[in-house]
Image (cartoon, grey):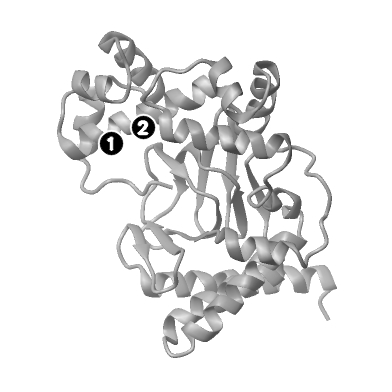
């Protein structure tokens, strides 16, 4: 008989294989695929990708096959099969698939958190305490119970008659596993309206709505009821960035999207997202994306298809 730890590892690997098969049945091309389950999105990439920016919403991200890296500020998070990430705020990140082949593509499932469902569950799950670090993104190893629940949710894609009844129940189980697990305290930050971390959450939301406008740390601190020094300290602890670095990333990502989708020039994009100096915009764009705007956009358009934004 195999030792209990070995049996557990075998069970995890078997479940990951089933999750990969379930994802593959419902996404045959590289990119994102919405599903018939609210808040569930699938992702696939048959090749490694260039670093691509994105804004992660509060969500669970589980990698079933392949590997990716996600950078938040000065921190790099590595996902391998069976590892999941929890995001508790809207955060600008850069993601890159680092292991994928046509025969064994990168496969991933995203579940956006329902704050109402999460808040109701949090009332019935004992709090595990305060997270050792308040950062708004983590990556952890998924246990067998969480993987089993994710698999059962994905299998409901093949059972549309049962989906409306069982889907919400399985989604609640996934949220329960997260609340009761090592990320439970961090998950509660999504529903909390009190404390420094909640104030940082309001600061993040305020910047997200006003990133095209000039603002000072003093003004932002006043908006959320903090002192400038306290805001700077706690904001960096949650996002691995200062508020102004956070604003800059949102501006650059927005400008890149405008140039790519609306086919406007760099100067026009710079002014639209709030830059007053096109030359400063070009310098910061090159520093962030590795190439000046025109060359970067031309490179993106030359790709057979846009790389999966991970």
Q: Residue sitting at 70 percent across and 52 percent down?
A: 188
* Left or right, residue 158 beside residue 71: left
**Residue in the foreground of this view, choosing between 108 and 46:** 108
Q: Distance between the Cα atoms at labels 2 and 1?
A: 6 Å
Q: Residue sitting at 19 percent across and 22 percent down?
A: 268
* Left or right, residue 70 beside residue 157: right
* Left or right, residue 208 beside residue 256: right
Q: Quadrant of residue 193?
A: top right
Q: Quadrant of residue 117?
A: bottom right
Q: Mark 2–mark 1 contact, CB under 8 Å?
A: yes
Residue 113 placement (x, y as % from top left) = 55, 59
In the rendered image, the vertical position of residue 7 relative to residue 298, given as above or below: below
Residue 169 placement (x, y as % from top left) = 60, 78
Residue 150 placement (x, y as % from top left) = 58, 71
Task: Give residue 253's mark.
Answer: 2
**Residue in the foreground of this view, choosing between 72 and 235:** 235
Secondary structure of residue under mark 2 = helix
**Could you tell me how many numbered marks the image carries?**
2
In the rendered image, the vertical position of residue 135 relative to residue 63, given as above or below: above
Residue for badge 1: 257
**Residue in the foreground of this view, choosing between 79 and 33:** 33
Secondary structure of residue under mark 1 = helix
- Residue 14 visible from this viewpoint: no
- Residue 128 visible from this viewpoint: yes
In the rendered image, the vertical position of residue 194 relative to residue 220, given as above or below: below
Q: Residue sitting at 23 percent across and 49 percent down?
A: 305
Split into 4 quadrants, where in the image is the N terminus? bottom right
Task: Give residue 3's mark.
Answer: none
* Left or right, residue 288 beside residue 87: left
Q: Residues within 10 Å of mark 1 (few under 14, many from 20)?
A: some
């Amino acid at each position: 008989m195999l030792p209990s730890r070995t049996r557990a590892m075998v069970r995890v690997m078997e479940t990951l294989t089933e999750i990969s098969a379930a994802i593959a049945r419902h996404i045959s091309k590289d990119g994102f695929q919405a599903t018939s389950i609210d808040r569930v999105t699938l992702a696939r990439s048959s090749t490694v990708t260039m670093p691509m920016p994105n804004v992660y919403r509060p969500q669970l991200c589980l990698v079933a096959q392949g590997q990716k890296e996600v950078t938040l500020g000065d921190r790099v998070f590595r996902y391998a099969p069976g590892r999941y990430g929890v995001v508790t705020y809207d955060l600008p990140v850069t993601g890159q698939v680092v292991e994928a082949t046509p025969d064994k593509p990168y496969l991933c499932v995203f579940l956006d958190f329902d704050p109402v469902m999460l808040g109701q569950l949090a009332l019935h799950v004992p709090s595990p305490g305060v997270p050792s670090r308040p950062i708004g993104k983590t990556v952890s190893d998924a246990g067998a119970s969480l993987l089993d629940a994710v698999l059962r949710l994905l299998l409901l894609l093949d059972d549309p008659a049962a989906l409306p009844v069982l889907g919400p129940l399985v989604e609640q189980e996934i949220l329960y596993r997260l609340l009761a697990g090592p990320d439970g305290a961090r998950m509660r930050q999504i529903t909390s309206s009190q404390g420094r971390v909640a104030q940082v959450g309001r600061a993040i939301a305020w910047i997200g709505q006003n990133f095209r406008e000039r603002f000072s740390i003093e003004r932002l601190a006043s908006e959320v009821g903090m002192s400038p020094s306290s805001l700077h300290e706690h904001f960096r602890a949650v996002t691995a960035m200062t508020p102004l670095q956070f604003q800059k990333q949102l501006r650059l990502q927005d400008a890149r999207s405008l140039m790519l989708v609306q086919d406007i020039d760099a100067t026009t994009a710079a002014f639209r997202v709030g830059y007053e100096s096109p030359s400063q915009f070009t310098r910061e764009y090159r520093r962030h994306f590795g190439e000046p705007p025109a060359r970067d956009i031309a490179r993106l358009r030359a790709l057979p298809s846009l790389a999966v934004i991970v």
